[in-house]
Amino acid sequence: MTRKFLIGIDLGGTNLKIALLDLNYRIISKFFLSTKTFKKKELLIKAIEFCVNRIINDNKLKKGSILGVGLGVPGPTDAKKGIVHFFPNIPGWKEVGLKRILEREVCLPVFLDNDAKVMALAEHKIGSAKGYENALCLTLGTGVGGGIIIGGKLYRGVSNAAGEFGHMPINEKGPSCPCGGIACLESYVGNKKILFEAKQKFSREISLEQLSELAKKQDKRALDIWNKVGERLGIALAGMVNVLNLDAIIIGGGVSDAGEALFEKIRKTIFKRAMSVQAKDVKVLKAKLGPDAGLIGAAILVRENAKD
């Protein structure tokens, strides 16, 4: 019997990451390309096709040994039909039948979903959400994405668009969001907002990594910023805890590297602002799988949907 493999792709606004995995979701090989060089939609699709063929050839495999290609994408999708509705942070994508296009080009089954949903699949299967029946998994970076696990299964909603935690409107008025909304949470806790506030406080450009390191060294200015972010997130999460009665909240993405300065404030704010019955049991945990979560989740998408 031919040994089978999975291909996982994590498409972001900065990088296109691709990995070859075995059926136990162990990564055998991976590489990435910068998406910034592919300005047009057609060029980015060609880049995905190139990456699939390259990882197969690099590992001296035949396409018959590949169970399928999973793809996590940074925007709302119709997973059943394989359609990308749009990408809030990558222009030029609207109602694109990406599954059909890629299946024609790479001659393999293709399955796609929102990147935060595939991260949630990964964390629930083998990461920090494993064993929890009702969990909210968040990715905090340039965008703020979410995947919801209810009753042990990924909740997609009627239009397969559930989980857009970053696009909850949290004020009557506020900044416009690329999603078309106003005063979305993402505008208050995304990378752009954090780095803008850091520049104001430090009077110079400062990276997210530097801000996290400074917080770990107890720098008061960095701690103030992360405390503010943690409070904003905690208030929004308190609402989710009240509505969904979650047993776990899993937080990943670059912002999560801020460590306890962020997490402790989130926990305290949830405990203070959520209803006592719901708040007492919820755990707030850091995601376990790091930058590989999207790749692993995309592979799980294949394993759970492909016909072997």
Image (cartoon, helix red, strand yellow):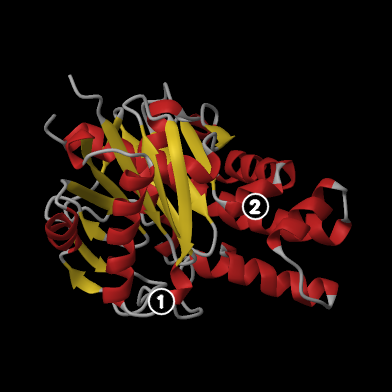
Q: Quadrant of the N terminus?
A: top left
Which element carries disc 1, helix, strand or loop? loop
Residue 90 seen in the figure: yes
Residue 120 seen in the figure: no
Residue designated by label 1: 178
Whether residue 266 is situated above or below residue 172 in the rendered picture? above
| Residue 223 rendering spot, x and y as whole percentages | 80, 54
Whether residue 171 is situated above or below residue 77 in the rendered picture? below
Residue designated by label 2: 230
> Going by the image, does 299 lie left or right of 210?
left
Q: In this rendering, which labeled residue sits more in front, label 1 or label 2?
A: 1
Q: Amino acid at mark 1?
A: Pro
- Quarter location, residue 209: bottom right
Return the residue found at the far front: 60
- Quarter location, residue 82: bottom left
> Going by the image, does 215 lie left or right of 73?
right
Nearest to the observer: residue 111 or residue 231 = 111
Q: Amino acid at mark 2?
A: Gly
Q: Quadrant of the C terminus?
A: top left
Which element carries disc 2, helix, strand or loop? helix
Nearest to the observer: residue 87 or residue 223 = 87
Q: Are marks 1 and 2 in contact (CB under 8 Å)?
A: no
Residue drawn 35% across the image and 37% down it: 121
Residue drawn 16% across the image and 60% down it: 105
Looking at marks 1 and 2 on the same chain, the residue that comes earlier in the sequence is marked by 1
Nearest to the observer: residue 152 or residue 26 = 26
Q: What number is the disc on residue 263?
A: none
| Residue 46 rendering spot, x and y as whole percentages | 28, 67
